[in-house]
Amino acid sequence: MSEEIPSTDLITLTRIVAHVLHDQLRLGAAATGDLTLLLTAIQVTSKFIATNVRKARLINLVGLAGETNVQGEEQKKLDVLSNDIMVNALRASGKTAVLVSEELEEAIVIEDKYKGTYCVVFDPLDGSSNIDAGVNIGTIFGIYKVRPGSKGTVEDVLRPGSEMVAAGYTMYGSSANLVLSTGSGVNGYTLDAALGEFILTHPNIKIPPRGKIYSFNEGNSMYFNPPVHAYLKSIKYPASGKSPYSARYIGSMVADVHRTLLYGGIFGYPDDKKSKSGKLRLLYEAFPMAFLTEQAGGIATTGTKRILDIMPQSIHERCPVFLGSKEDVQDLMRFYSEAS
Ligand code: AHG
Ligand code: MN
Ligand code: MN
Ligand code: MN
């Protein structure tokens, strides 16, 4: 049997974003190319963070930075480094007006010299607790266009996630995987480190309508509310003849969501008796992941309402998250509606 020769026609992220712009211009849309350039800046930050993640143990980048962020979490060195990489690159791109980061208490309003028309909300390094063990971590981002007439204020990001123009994440694992949606489906790319390019490896990701995996931190069970208990019981002790679901929980949202997009099933971080709004942050964790989930044909809910419809009141607010395969999330939602 002859071996297949390597492709000489690589579809890179750079090529796809350029094509999107080309198509917009061909169709007569008032496209400026700014989003293309912004996405190019973001992919460079992912490569830069990825290379630091790889070397972290060797160049003393593991461990604590010594400061606490606005959420009361101790910042790891990689949290701070990734934040600085993103802020510097996004400002210098000249395409942004407002930046919101998990690691910065206030939104950054970009000075006139560098000001553009997009707002980026981001979790520079997701899964901090996994850094020192070398377990998968990531970066999450969502992009809004400033409102017409606005010069860029925090109000431009206090908007429902459904108004985002793009969202994505990069997972730093055995390879770096960038998953992106600009509102017409979801594509996944894998970094070819030798080429320095993200190559399209997962075109048009669709979540299977039903999965076999659930992903919750069940260590919090004693705080969970009745609908969550009842739902988890239903998948662990199914009607006779059916197999129970498998548990998979990494503790990095990026990695747990990535697996859910590819394999299906349900990921959940509920509100509970201790954390009344859950743990995950609405703007830069829940919204981007909800955007990707819906674009891949899945559902993202708080249990009772669509995440993308939430109107944020403040930049670091939290919200309960359940997302994944359509049928699995619908099952969960039934337990909520029966409880009300
Ligand atoms: P971050 O590292 O950006 O602060 O996010 C941590 C989040 C998220 O990645 C993950 O899903 C969740 O925290 C895990 O929380 P538990 O350790 O409570 O399970
Ligand atoms: Mn954190
Ligand atoms: Mn996070
Ligand atoms: Mn983080």
Image: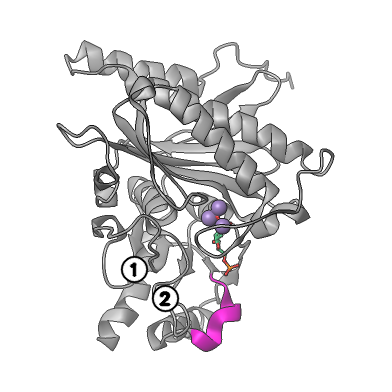
Mark toward the start of the polypeptide (2 vs 1): 2
Question: Label 2 to label 1, Cα distance in Å?
Answer: 8 Å
How many numbered circles are shown?
2
Question: What is the x, y in percent for residue 283?
Answer: 37, 53
The one nearer the camera, 113 or 7, is: 113
Question: What is the x, y in percent for residue 56?
Answer: 77, 42
Question: What is the x, y in percent for residue 124?
Answer: 54, 44
Query: Against 43, is 336 above or below?
Result: below
Quadrant housing the C terminus: bottom left
- The answer to whether one can see residue 306 in this image is yes
Determine whether label 2 and label 1 are within 8 Å by CB.
yes
- The span shown in magenta is 216-223
Horizontal side, residue 155 vs residue 283: left or right: left
Horizontal side, residue 112 vs residue 268: left or right: left
Residue drawn where x is 48% and y is 82% of the image: 274
Give neighbour class at mark 2: few <14, some 14-19, many 20+ (Cα, 10 Å).
Answer: many
Which is the main secondary structure of the residues drawn in magenta?
helix
The one nearer the camera, 337 or 127, is: 127
Residue 289 has which mark?
none
Quadrant for residue 298, please give it. bottom left
Query: Against 276, is 171 above or below?
Result: above
For the residue labelled by badge 2, is the local secondary structure a helix, a strand or a loop? loop
Residue drawn where x is 19% and y is 15% of the image: 27
Residue 271 has which mark?
2
For the residue labelled by badge 1, is the local secondary structure a helix, a strand or a loop? loop
Farthest right residue? 58
Question: Which-is-in-front pick, marks 2 and 1?
Answer: 2
Disc 2 residue type? Asp
Give neighbour class at mark 1: few <14, some 14-19, many 20+ (Cα, 10 Å).
Answer: many
Residue 302 has which mark?
1
